[in-house]
Amino acid sequence: MAIVYLGLGSNLGNREANLRAALRGLWRRGRVEAVSSLYETEPVGGPAQPPFYNAACRWETGLEPMPLLRFLQGLEHELGRRPGEERWAPRPIDLDVLLYEDRIVGEEGLTIPHPRLAERPFVLAPLAEIAADVRHPVEGKTIAELLAVAGTEGVRRIAEAGWAGMAAEKRRL
């Protein structure tokens, strides 16, 4: 089993419900071990669009990187994201592999660690809550150190770790 850190985002529809549905879906192929607080952030790049809800989770899975990517893309599709959408367009769900243990992967359609992880406060802030001491395998710095450099401008915490009711929801799964 591998420890994988995922970034979760949503800016269409019921954003919180979309993130909760994605977290429930992850249990089909692994175990969600930790979930960050919930953040609201302004979109980066792309057309004008609504703000995102962002979170991060630590997930234990037996999937190797490429099957993991296919699983996540299938889960995104189930939750309303369609292939071929404009890059950085509004979307009901966005699931990104941020880190996969300390592995470095560069395959067609998949780069691990996530190529823009070290420069994105909206990813680093939630990730630092659950992986502050984890080292970025390319940068050599911890997630907390990367966040200190990137800052938290435009990142607003709107719900504490576990979000209201998430623990009860997990027990039902």
Image (cartoon, rainbow, N blue to C red):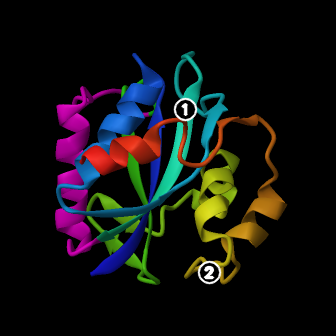
SS class of the residue under badge 1? strand
For badge 2, the amino acid type reads: Arg
Q: Mark 1 highlights which residue? A: 53
Tell me the quarter of the picture where residue 80 sits.
top left
- Which residues are drawn in magenta? 61-87
Kindly report the distance in space between the C-alpha atoms of the residues bearing marks 2 and 1. 25 Å
In the displayed structure image, the side of residue 141 where residue 35 appears, left or right? left
The question of residue 66 being in magenta is answered with yes
For badge 1, the amino acid type reads: Tyr
SS class of the residue under badge 2? loop
Residue sitting nearer the eye, 62 or 42 = 62
In the displayed structure image, the side of residue 154 where residue 52 appears, left or right? left
Specify whether residue 41 is in view: yes
Residue 140 lies, with reference to residue 88, above or below; the image says: below
What residue is rendered at 32% in x and 50% in y?
171
Residue 88: x and y in percent read 46, 32
What residue is rendered at 39% in x and 16% in y?
13
In the displayed structure image, the side of residue 7 where residue 121 appears, left or right? right
- Which is more N-terminal, label 1 or label 2? 1
The N terminus: image quadrant? bottom left
Residue 122: x and y in percent read 64, 45
Q: Which mark is residue 135?
A: 2
Specify whether residue 93 is in view: no
What residue is rendered at 45% in x and 42% in y?
166
What residue is rendered at 63% in x and 37% in y?
39
Residue sitting nearer the eye, 78 or 159 = 159
Residue 47: x and y in percent read 53, 19
Residue 26 lies, with reference to residue 85, above or below; the image says: below
- Numbered disc in front, either 2 or 1: 1
Residue 122 lies, with reference to residue 15, above or below; the image says: below
Residue 41: x and y in percent read 65, 32
